[in-house]
Image (cartoon, rainbow, N blue to C red):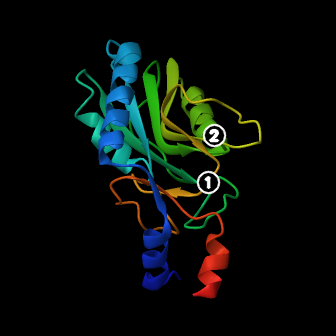
């Protein structure tokens, strides 16, 4: 279990890399990019729970065209900091057959979760499947896919805020924050 003292420590010692103004500009650009490709497609937006709940909420009012919204819950983290096997918790109720699907997630790191979700949508008969992420992390390993729409490109660091969490907490931070690189060491000292 994570202590509130640890959460406060992480919050106070992390660096804001996107403030509220930059976040708003990021959402505006994502909305423009998505609109250009999808405004005449009557898409189904799939919110990848739980991380993308903020992104989908912020983007909805900026996408001024016909669309449906559903969600999918697949995770590799289960509240931890490191991903493991993909676990399916909830599949969408909306039929994806012959539909344009826009999968929205908070972050693309290794790309395994997004690739699994995209494969699921294609298996369900989606006519076209786009991927959108708030953050694309520049990791060293080759990713199984590249996102079609990206809000921000980041170096490989642990981020939270805008729906991204630190051990299940801090998703509600209105900005994008990077944990200190030596966080575990710092936590042991306190």
Does residue 87 appear to the left or right of 142 in the view shown? left
For the point 43% across and 70% down, the residue is 11
Quadrant holding the C terminus: bottom right
The answer, for residue 86, to whether it is visible in the render is yes
Rendered location of residue 77, percent (x, y): 60, 60
Instruction: Evaluate if marks 2 and 1 touch, with contact meaning CB atoms under 8 Å apart.
Output: no
Front residue (pair 101, 22): 22
> Of the residues tagged 2 and 1, which is closer to the observer?
1
Q: Residues within 10 Å of mark 2 (few under 14, many from 20)?
A: some
Q: Is residue 42 left or right of residue 151?
A: left
Q: Which of 129 and 90 is in front in this view?
A: 129
Q: Which of marks 1 and 2 precedes in the sequence?
A: 2
At which x and y percent is residue 130? 50, 25
Looking at the image, residue 32 sits to the left or right of residue 128; the answer is: left
Residue at the image point whose x is 34% and y is 19% from the top: 35
| Image location of residue 94, percent across then percent down | 38, 35
Which residue is identified by label 1?
157
Q: In which quarter of the image is residue 12?
A: bottom left
Number of residue marks:
2
Residue 126 visible in rendering: no
Decide: few, some or many residues near mark 1? Use Cα within 10 Å; few <14, some 14-19, many ≥20. some
Mark 1 lies on a secondary structure that is loop
Q: How far apart are marks 2 and 1 (CA)?
A: 23 Å
Question: Which residue is farthest right?
Answer: 141
- Mark carried by residue 169: none
Locate residue 141 relative to residue 149 in the image: left or right. Answer: right
On residue 116, which mark appears?
A: 2
Residue 113 is situated, as x and y percent measured from the top left of the image, at 61, 45
| Residue in view at x 34 percent, y 21 percent | 32
Q: Which of 108 and 77 is in front in this view?
A: 108
Q: Vertically, is 11 above or below 62? A: below
């Amino acid at each position: 279990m994570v202590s509130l003292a640890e959460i406060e420590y992480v919050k106070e010692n992390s660096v804001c890399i996107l403030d509220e103004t930059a976040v708003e500009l990021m959402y505006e650009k994502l909305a423009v990019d998505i609109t250009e490709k999808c405004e005449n497609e009557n898409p189904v937006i799939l919110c990848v729970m739980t991380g993308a709940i903020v992104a989908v909420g912020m983007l909805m009012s900026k996408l001024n065209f016909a669309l449906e919204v559903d969600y999918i819950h697949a995770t590799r983290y289960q509240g931890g900091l490191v991903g493991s096997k993909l676990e399916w918790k909830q599949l969408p109720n909306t039929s994806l057959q012959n539909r344009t699907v826009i999968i929205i997630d908070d972050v693309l790191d290794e790309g395994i979760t997004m690739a699994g979700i995209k494969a699921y949508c294609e298996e369900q008969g989606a006519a076209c499947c786009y991927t959108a992420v708030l953050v694309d992390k520049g990791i060293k390993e080759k990713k199984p896919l590249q996102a079609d729409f990206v809000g921000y490109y980041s170096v490989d660091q642990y981020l939270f805020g805008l729906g991204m969490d630190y051990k299940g907490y801090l998703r509600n931070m209105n900005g994008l924050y990077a944990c200190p690189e030596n966080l575990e060491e710092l936590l042991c000292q306190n």
